[in-house]
Image (cartoon, rainbow, N blue to C red):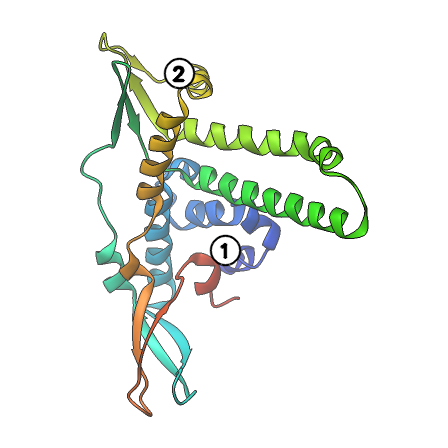
Amino acid sequence: MTTMDELSLKNPDALINAEALINVIKSCVPSIPNPRNLCNIDAEALYLGIRHATYGKDIEHSHKCTKCEEVSSYNIDIDYLLNKFPSFDAVPMIEHDGMKIFLRPLSIESMTKVSLVELEQTKIIRSIRQTVENDETDEETLAKKYYNSFLKIAQYNVNLLAEAINYIETDEGTKVEDKAYINEFIDNVPSTIVDMINTEVKKLSIKPLDLSDFEFVCPECGNKDKTSVEVNPVNFSEAG
């Protein structure tokens, strides 16, 4: 990473809309033509590789022992983490009404949209709580006030599911990749199928536990602590 790459990782706005993360890949791995289309788990592996190339194979982590409260430093081996990343040999598929729905992991851009939707939901809930605490507004008035916001979030979620569909194969063997058709399909498909798609997409987006769960042995008292350490580009940059 260059100095500009590192500084961009300290910009909260650029991190929220993923511009900083995308630009780091453009800078460090220029052979990738469009980083926005990378699936999230591939991007995370790339960030670890970028960290390795910039600072070496070890990530230093400080941990406070739950028994004696001694704070010690530990090294997390990036090579070990990279070897734990999963590989997908087959694209998940869901069958519905003679059609086959082929899925794919969410891209960096899609995962960013998920984060923005979650942020918007949090803002709405906080606003509702403040309204209830400071006003005698009845539930019906509240529902009308926030209906459009919740409708907007619901549409975002539908669009995200559509983006997770790679293509649809009809019972006649036709391969459908047109996004407008896929969006229309998601809008009209039964909720049970939507739930199935959502479940499969979540499986593709979740990292294995041993990529974030570690056991640290205290050098002072020998106590073993199991803890979760999120290793991502936001917290591994030495500029931050």
**Which residue is found at the position 23% from the left and 49% from the top?**
86
**Relative to 34, residue 10 above or below:** below
Of residue 79 and residue 116, the one placed in the foreground of this image is 116
User: Which is closer to the viewer, label 2 or label 1?
Assistant: 2
**Which residue is found at the position 51% from the left and 61% from the top?**
3
Nearest to N terminus: mark 2 or mark 1: 1
**Which residue is found at the position 54% from the left and 51% from the top?**
15
Residue 1 visible in the displayed image: no
Q: Which residue is mark 2?
A: 178
Q: Which residue is mark 1?
A: 5
Of residue 205 and residue 98, the one placed in the foreground of this image is 98
Q: In the image, what residue type sits under mark 1?
A: Asp
Mark 2: which secondary structure?
A: loop
Q: Quadrant of residue 37?
A: top left
Mark 1: which secondary structure?
A: helix
Q: Given the current orientation, which residue lies at the most extreme top position?
A: 172
Q: In the image, what residue type sits under mark 2?
A: Asp
Residue 82 location (% of width, % of height) = 26, 57
